[in-house]
Image: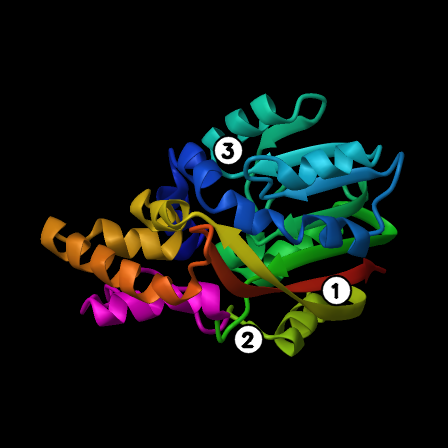
Amino acid sequence: MTAFDEYERELWAGRAEAFLRSSAALCAHPAGDLLDAASVGRGDRLLDVGTGTGTVAGLGHDRGAEVTGVDAEPGMIEVARQRVPGVEFRHALLPRLPFADGEFDAAVGNFVVNHVGDPVAAVRELARVVRPGGRVAVTIWPYPPPPAQQLWATIFEAAGVERPADLPRVAPDRDFPRTADGLTDLLGRAGLTEPGCDTITWDHRTDPETWWNGPAGGIGSHGAILRRQTPATVERVRAEFDRHTAPYREADGLLTLPTAALLGVGVVG
């Protein structure tokens, strides 16, 4: 466990319900593409790592796969069990999973690589538990960030809020470029063959209060920053939020936020 891993455990502790009410819908969008990339079908043994509230696991179950979902946050497991009956959910942390070599036909991780301190070790562990010829597929948020994610940085900057210097980051010698080439290279270094990456783009439609409630509920790095601010600063951030989201607000009151994800896949040799 790196300092970044410990930070992530603290960041997400007790926030499953807040995630479900805010960012879960955004993260759910690539789920079908992720399962397609991993060639998940009826009868396949699928491992969903970083299952969160169980969206990908549930879609895999609907396809007839035999699904096991794991997450590092016990609260996520509790919510996933309530939302997706019929799927086995367990508490487990990368890069050490409690499964035998080759136990699954495929493994997927929807945005989980964004939340580990050693991405190569994490993907290597996913490959270990998949049989030869099976697929590992993962999604990450790209950098530079798409408009939906960049919007929060713009809001913080306008409100005079800076990222605290003591928030842990992935160590430079373990990090990788959050680009299509960077993710493809990561999969190859983790031992996967035929690595590749596609970019998925979409417009995320959401209520402004839902978009605000993610960071306001402590979700993600933006939530970690917002939690450290004084009430007066939070009020200033909210004012800038209203101002900078206004151009994305449609006639029905919802926001239309352009966003993107990188979807990488490789084959276990």
Amino acid at pointer 2? Pro
Is 1 drawn above or below residue 202 in the view shown?
above
> In the image, residue 41 lies at what x, y percent?
87, 42
Nearest the viewer among 122 and 34 is 34
Q: Nearer the viewer, mark 2 or mark 1?
A: 2
Q: Which mark is residue 253?
A: none
- In which quarter of the view is residue 158 placed? bottom left
> In the image, residue 163 lies at what x, y percent?
26, 66
SS of the residue under disc 3: helix
Which residue is depicted at the point 77% across and 69% down? 195
Specify whether residue 157 is painted magenta.
yes
Q: Report how far apart the C-alphas of labels 2 and 3 lie in the structure.
A: 28 Å
Could you tell me if residue 213 is visible in this image?
Answer: yes
Q: Which residue is mark 3?
A: 76
Q: Nearer the viewer, mark 3 or mark 1?
A: 3
Nearest the viewer among 28 and 258 is 258
Is there a contact, CB below 8 Å, between mark 2 and mark 3?
no
> In the image, residue 236 lies at what x, y percent?
17, 59
**Left-right relation of 237 to 197:** left
Amino acid at pointer 1? Gly
In the rendered structure, which segment of residues is drawn in magenta? 146-173
Q: Which residue is mark 1?
A: 191
Is there a contact, CB below 8 Å, between mark 2 and mark 1?
no
- Considering every residue shown, the one lying at the far front of the view is 251
Q: Which residue is mark 2?
A: 177
Badge 2, how many Cα within 10 Å: few under 14, some, many 20+? some
Is 117 drawn above or below residue 71 in the view shown?
below
- Decide which of tag 2 and tag 1 comes sooner along the chain: 2
